[in-house]
Image: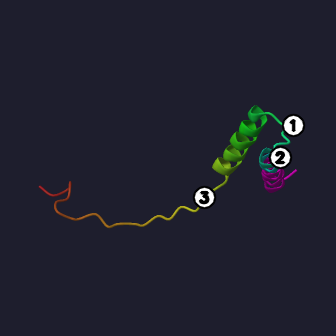
Amino acid sequence: MARRDQLACVNKAIRKIEEKLEQGDVKATVGDYIRLLELKKQFLAEQPREIKVTWVEPKNEGSATEE
């Protein structure tokens, strides 16, 4: 199962538990809910992020080769 599919399953389970909490018909424990939130956090933390790099020319105030 692809990571995206796993994350979608975790999100679905979280939504189901939240719906049950709102209705007062909770069969899942709070521990289950917390574990799902932690699992979601892990999935999101492991995804590659866009990183932008900008090159800044150093000031040439004095070179190490100058005497």
> Is residue 19 rendered magenta in the image?
no
User: What's the magenta bit mostly, secondary-structure-wise?
Assistant: helix
Disc 2 to disc 3, how far (Cα)? 33 Å
Whether pointer 3 and pointer 1 mark residues with C-beta atoms closer than 8 Å, the reply is no
**Residue 26 placed where, x, y %?**
84, 39
Q: At 69% from the left edge and 40% from the top edge, which residue is drawn?
A: 38
Disc 3 to disc 1, how far (Cα)? 36 Å
Kindly state the secondary structure of the residue where label 1 is placed.
loop
* 3 sits left or right of 63 in the view: right
Mark 1 and mark 2 lie on one chain; the one further toward the N terminus is 2
**Residue 55 placed where, x, y %?**
40, 66
Q: Looking at numbered disc 1 in the image, what kind of residue is underneath it?
A: Lys
Report the coloring of the rendering.
rainbow
Quadrant assignment, res 5: bottom right
Mark 3 and mark 1 lie on one chain; the one further toward the N terminus is 1
Q: At 20% from the left edge and 56% from the top edge, which residue is drawn?
A: 65
The residue mark sitting in front, 2 or 3, is 2
Q: Residues within 10 Å of mark 3 (few under 14, many from 20)?
A: few
**Residue 1 placed where, x, y %?**
88, 50
Mark 2 and mark 3 lie on one chain; the one further toward the N terminus is 2
The residue mark sitting in front, 3 or 1, is 1
Q: Looking at numbered disc 3 in the image, what kind of residue is underneath it?
A: Arg
According to the picture, the residue beneath numbered tag 3 turns out to be 49
Kindly state the secondary structure of the residue where label 3 is placed.
loop
Tag of residue 20: 2
Kindly state the secondary structure of the residue where label 2 is placed.
helix
Whether pointer 1 and pointer 2 mark residues with C-beta atoms closer than 8 Å, the reply is yes
- Magenta extent: 1-16
Q: Looking at numbered disc 2 in the image, what kind of residue is underneath it?
A: Lys
32 is higher (above) or lower (below) than 49: above
